Image: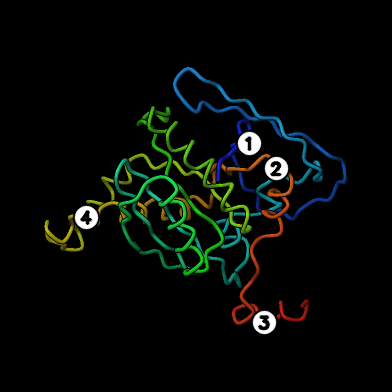
Amino acid sequence: MQVPPMAIQFIALKPLLSPIKQNPLPIKYKNSTSLRSGTQLSVTAAVSVPVSVPWEEQIPPNAVLRKRTPSWRGGFSLGVDLGLSRTGVAISKGFTVRPLTVLELRGQKLELRLLDLAEKEEVDEFIIGLPKNSDGKETEQSNKVRSVAGRFAVRAAERGWRVYLQDEHGTSSEALDHMIAKGLSKSAREGRLDAYAAMKVLERYFEHSGKEIELVVPKQVELQNKLRKGPPKDIDFFPEESQDL
């Protein structure tokens, strides 16, 4: 699927833990991001949503729901550490985070494989690591990740799945230290570092309760509505949902 120009907006979230306040006034979100060196993309999207209800309240990240609701039962989150040749993937189910796999794919094949994994693992959000320097500034690699995340967010939104960007600075080093601490040999660590780095991205996301992540939102209102609705819930996991069918 080709993503048309000006079709993506990146919205920095500051998750709130207060109840949603209703207000029927439509508002406009505006954001800018650099997709490549020297090029700025500005997106303004008119969305008919309550003015006092930010995106993080319309579709709260799982990290917020976990903190807000003691009886929270899901959903599940997929962590993604994008690389030039290999992509690490980790999974969070409930309160457990673990490395899942490393994919040696790129482009459309990678995106489709991530969607297949999400379907199999029954996740409803993707947490993609965003490379940054130690001072918090973005890099040339950040632009590439934003571009991939933008294309992927369109595919994910078709199924009601959310895509977020999370600062991943230092997660590779943390992953290596974690593997060494577990006693994994050098040979055992080879080829698995990316998956553990993705795990560290997920751990950081939950440790900070989803603060300062960015929601990647397609500009198309139809896809935004699918994000708000979310994916169908598993009736075996949420039996009360069957009453609405």
Which residue lies under the disc numbered 4?
A: 191
Q: For residue 194, which numbered disc appears in the image?
A: none
Residue nearest the viewer, comparing 3 with 169:
3
> How far is disc 2 from disc 1 in space, using C-alphas?
7 Å
Q: Quadrant of residue 82?
A: top left
Which residue lies under the disc numbered 3?
A: 239
Which residue lies under the disc numbered 1?
A: 7
- Going by the numbered disc 1, the residue's amino acid type is Ala
| Residue drawn at 44 percent across, 21 percent down | 37
- Going by the numbered disc 2, the residue's amino acid type is Gln
| Residue drawn at 59 percent across, 79 percent down | 237
Q: First in sequence, mark 2 or 4: give its number.
A: 4
Could you tell me residue 128's position as x and y percent?
45, 47
Q: Secondary structure at mark 1?
A: loop
> How far is disc 1 from disc 3 in space, using C-alphas?
37 Å
- Going by the numbered disc 4, the residue's amino acid type is Gly
Q: Secondary structure at mark 4?
A: loop
Could you tell me residue 159's position as x and y percent?
61, 59
Q: For residue 220, which numbered disc appears in the image?
A: 2
Compared to residue 204, the image places residue 27 above or below, namely above
Q: Residues within 10 Å of mark 4 (few under 14, many from 20)?
A: few
Instruction: Assess whether mark 1 and mark 2 are in contact (beta carbons under 8 angstroms).
Output: yes
Q: Quadrant of residue 212?
A: top right
| Residue drawn at 33 percent across, 61 percent down | 101
> How far is disc 1 from disc 4 in space, using C-alphas?
35 Å
Could you tell me residue 168's position as x and y percent?
39, 42
Which is more foreground, mark 1 or mark 4?
1
